[in-house]
Image (cartoon, coloured by chain):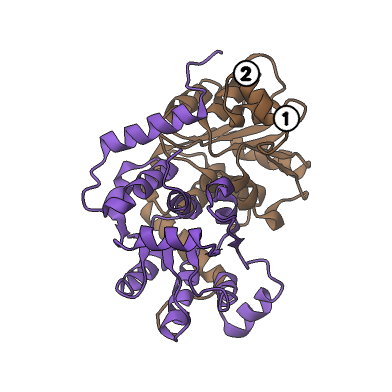
Chain colours: A brown, B purple
Amino acid sequence: RRYDYVTDGDEIYRRSFATIRSETDRSHLPVSAETVAVRMVHACGQTDLIQHLVVTPDFVPAARAALAAGAPILTDAHMVVSGVTRRRLPADNDVVCHLRDPRVPALARDWGTTRSAAAVSLWADQLDGAVVAIGNAPTALFHLLEMIDDGAPLPAAIVGVPVGFIGAAESKDALLQHVSAVPLLTVRGRRGGSAMAASAINAVAQADEL
Amino acid sequence: RRYDYVTDGDEIYRRSFATIRSETDRSHLPVSAETVAVRMVHACGQTDLIQHLVVTPDFVPAARAALAAGAPILTDAHMVVSGVTRRRLPADNDVVCHLRDPRVPALARDWGTTRSAAAVSLWADQLDGAVVAIGNAPTALFHLLEMIDDGAPLPAAIVGVPVGFIGAAESKDALLQHVSAVPLLTVRGRRGGSAMAASAINAVAQADEL
């Protein structure tokens, strides 16, 4: 080899997680969320993410139990579908994104909303007890909260980490108003994204880090 | 609606890009890379990314010409495959990831390397004039550089933004040693990821932002 680098995949993970643990203070988080926080930092390469992370104490137990019982993972982005590591899922769980459903463009047009929000409306029959992972669109998270506020069945847990400059921080503030109603994980502010959403799901899906 | 938010997709993009432009200084970048930088900031929600971004003056012209001529996009991650917006591609370009190729596990074992690096070795016949987008594994970028150093055909342009704590910063430093050999884009340090890689490709693929 012409360069000096670690080539063992498991060893790269071990050293990465050890580096993250040595550089971060995770004392404000529930113990059950510790591996989730470490994996999310790993996904973005930034230790200061921890300070913006909010995880309710019931989030990991509720999401993990739901996945073990076969609950689907509902997401707003195909990148999250790609990012979920299938061999970590305990029950070969479905990972569902309706963004390319043929009904979506007309729904978005009729309602005057984004395709992401229109696709979330198609979760109606799947929401009860599901694990939600929103990693892209603030409008998707807003629409989910509107469905819940209007009496839709509650998911088992919500990962709500849309990213961006218009509505992302606000949508996560709105999610945090539901902290007593549903187990949730979010990252305050503009940061988020599909890699963070997928890494949270991957950490929840299996207690072992490797 | 129960919440106050923008629901027009194009308007969300326009306001996002305007916010990013008002909050960032892009004067150190080539003019041709301005829309790429803005789109990458949009993908991660962080304006300070700009300071860590390196784009050679030939990167956007070379990558754009290659895509217009039908060059494939070679990537190390299925999340990048999902993140490339097909309607922005000028020639219905292939987006290629060999990570699930059946030859990969044996190659990785035989060579004592990661599956990501082994998958990159399968680019050998496709590398000449291609657009490379590495958004996940430092070992994939190291392996690509080793292939190039050993005389492999040069790609038209390289997006090299692996993420993480073990080898990511070092692999990007090694990429920057090739700055006179190949048009390139990278983000110094630990930050990177599939969303950043895909956003760079999406910006290059089409000059119009919307």
How crowded pointer 1 is (Cα within 10 Å; few <14, some 14-19, many 20+) is rated as: some
Q: Position of residue B7 (x, y in %)?
A: 52, 23
- Tags 1 and 2 touching, CB below 8 Å: no
The chain holding disc 2 is: A
**Residue under label 1:** A103
In what element is the residue under mark 2?
helix
In space, the residues marked 1 and 2 are separated at their CA atoms by 12 Å
Q: Residue at x 68, y 30 (%)?
A: A104
Tell whether B209 sits left or right of A200: left
Q: Is residue A44 visible?
A: yes
Kind of residue at badge 1: Arg
Q: Amino acid at mark 2?
A: Trp
Quadrant of the snapshot with the C terminus of chain A? bottom right
Residue under the point 60% across and 27% down: A117
Frontmost residue, A34 versus B25: B25
Q: Image height check: is B84 above or below B74?
A: above
Residue B100 falls in image quadrant: bottom right
A97 or A161: which is nearer to us? A97
Picture quadrant where residue B184 is located: bottom left
- The quadrant of the rendering that contains the N terminus of chain A is bottom left
Q: Is residue A71 above or below residue B128?
A: above
The spot of residue A17 in percent (x, y) is 48, 59
Q: Residue at x 27, y 51 (%)?
A: B31
Residue assigned mark 2: A111
Q: Is label 1 in a helix, a strand or a loop?
A: loop
Residue B18 location (% of width, % of height): 33, 32
Name the side, left or right, on which A203 lies relative to A190. right
Relative to B186, residue A90 above or below: above
